[in-house]
């Protein structure tokens, strides 16, 4: 009798586990069927714009996973703007190719700063935000890992929120004789999805996008067939704001449901077995 009950319990548990696995598989398949999730990562990578703005208003739009470049002069302020959505932890990397050491008169210090759509300077969790280049250095590389973008925040807080983020690259210390020397700058933004662990109970009515992308395109003279300035997608993610429905909360929800079902089945069989007289034959 005990063997029969154990076999029955084993079959029930196996059925519950199979149902949980089916739910997870179905969720993954639905995510794979989503057009925004089916794009190949290689399609998102590639060369970005080959210029940079010189102010917030003329910041050059760039998408994540793109490498933006610009030819500039030492002392210029270089600006790019990229979109970041809720749950993303962005990493900004910048590389400056310096002039030949024979033309320079000493060391230089470079810095990369990141501002949100309200032009509030965002702190770097870690990275090399400021670096000093030796007089004989060929390049200097900078990085800034931002805090995870929150879906909602109190008005008085300085939390990163969904919207546009500005990258500003410039030299902060160098010999006066080196001002104006030609340099080549590169910047690239990547991010990791921190998922449901950073979700909050609230959302913004609109992302913090002040509409500077269209201004930047109008200044650059890029226009469409109708003669109107093209609105660049740099101020919005390619798949839209908060477009993905899948987060790791689905895993916790399904996993919790499976565990609760197993506990209920086990408790039912345990109490039913204790209340059953030992002299009753199986099947009665």
Image (tube, rainbow, N blue to C red):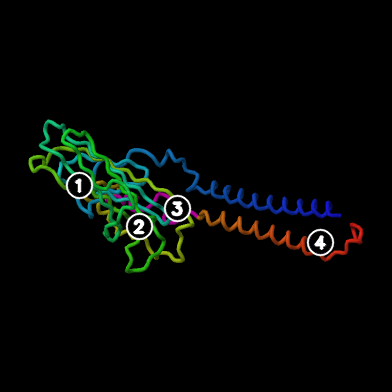
Compared to residue 106, the image places residue 262 above or below, namely: below
The residue that label 3 is drawn on is 194
Q: CA distance from mark 4 to mark 3?
A: 45 Å
Compared to residue 138, the image places residue 80 above or below, namely: below
Mark 3 or mark 2: which comes first in sequence? 2
At numbered mark 3, what does the secondary structure look like: helix, strand or loop?
A: loop
The residue that label 4 is drawn on is 273
The residue that label 1 is drawn on is 170
Compared to residue 271, the image places residue 94 above or below, namely: above
Compared to residue 273, the image places residue 136 above or below, namely: above
Check whether the beta carbons of the residues at disc 4 and disc 2 lie within 8 A of each other.
no
* Residue 59 seen in the figure: yes
* Residue 228 seen in the figure: no
Please check the rendered image and state whether residue 231 is part of the magenta-colored stretch, yes or no.
Answer: yes
The nearer-to-camera label among 1 and 4 is 4
Q: CA distance from mark 4 to mark 2?
A: 59 Å
Main SS category, magenta section:
loop
Along the line of sight, the residue nearer the viewer: 128 or 246: 128
Along the line of sight, the residue nearer the viewer: 88 or 244: 88
Q: What are the residue bounds of the magenta stretch?
A: 229-244
Q: CA distance from mark 3 to mark 1?
A: 30 Å
Mark 3 or mark 1: which comes first in sequence? 1
Q: In the rendered view, does 264 fall on the left or right side of 118?
A: right
At numbered mark 2, what does the secondary structure look like: helix, strand or loop?
A: strand
Label drawn at residue 163: 2
Q: CA distance from mark 2 to mark 1?
A: 23 Å
Q: Exactly how many numbered labels are in the figure?
A: 4
Please check the rendered image and state whether residue 5 is part of the magenta-colored stretch, yes or no.
Answer: no
């Amino acid at each position: 009798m005990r063997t029969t009950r154990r076999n029955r319990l084993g079959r029930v548990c196996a059925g519950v586990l199979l149902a949980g696995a089916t739910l997870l598989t179905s969720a993954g398949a639905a995510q794979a069927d989503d057009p925004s999730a089916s794009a190949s990562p290689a399609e998102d990578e590639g060369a970005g714009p080959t210029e940079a703005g010189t102010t917030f208003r003329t910041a050059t739009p760039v998408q994540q996973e793109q490498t933006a470049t610009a030819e500039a002069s030492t002392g210029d302020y270089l600006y790019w703007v990229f979109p970041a959505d809720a749950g993303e932890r962005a990493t900004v990397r910048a590389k400056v190719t310096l002039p030949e050491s024979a033309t320079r008169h000493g060391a230089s210090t470079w810095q990369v700063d990141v501002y949100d759509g309200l032009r509030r300077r965002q702190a770097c969790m870690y990275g090399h935000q400021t670096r000093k280049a030796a007089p004989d250095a060929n390049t200097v590389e900078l990085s800034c890992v931002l805090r995870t973008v929150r879906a909602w925040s109190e008005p008085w807080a300085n939390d990163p929120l969904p919207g546009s983020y500005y990258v500003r690259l410039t030299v902060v210390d160098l010999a006066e004789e080196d001002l104006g020397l030609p340099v080549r700058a590169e910047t690239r933004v990547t991010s990791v999805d921190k998922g449901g662990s950073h979700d909050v109970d609230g959302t913004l009515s609109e992302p913090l996008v002040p509409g500077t992308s269209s201004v930047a395109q109008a200044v650059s003279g890029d226009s469409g067939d109708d003669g109107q300035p093209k609105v660049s997608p740099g101020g919005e993610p390619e798949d839209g704001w908060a477009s993905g429905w899948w987060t790791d909360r689905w895993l916790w929800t399904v996993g919790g449901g499976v565990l609760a079902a197993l506990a209920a089945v086990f408790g039912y069989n345990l109490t039913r077995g204790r209340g059953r007289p030992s002299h009753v034959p199986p099947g009665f």
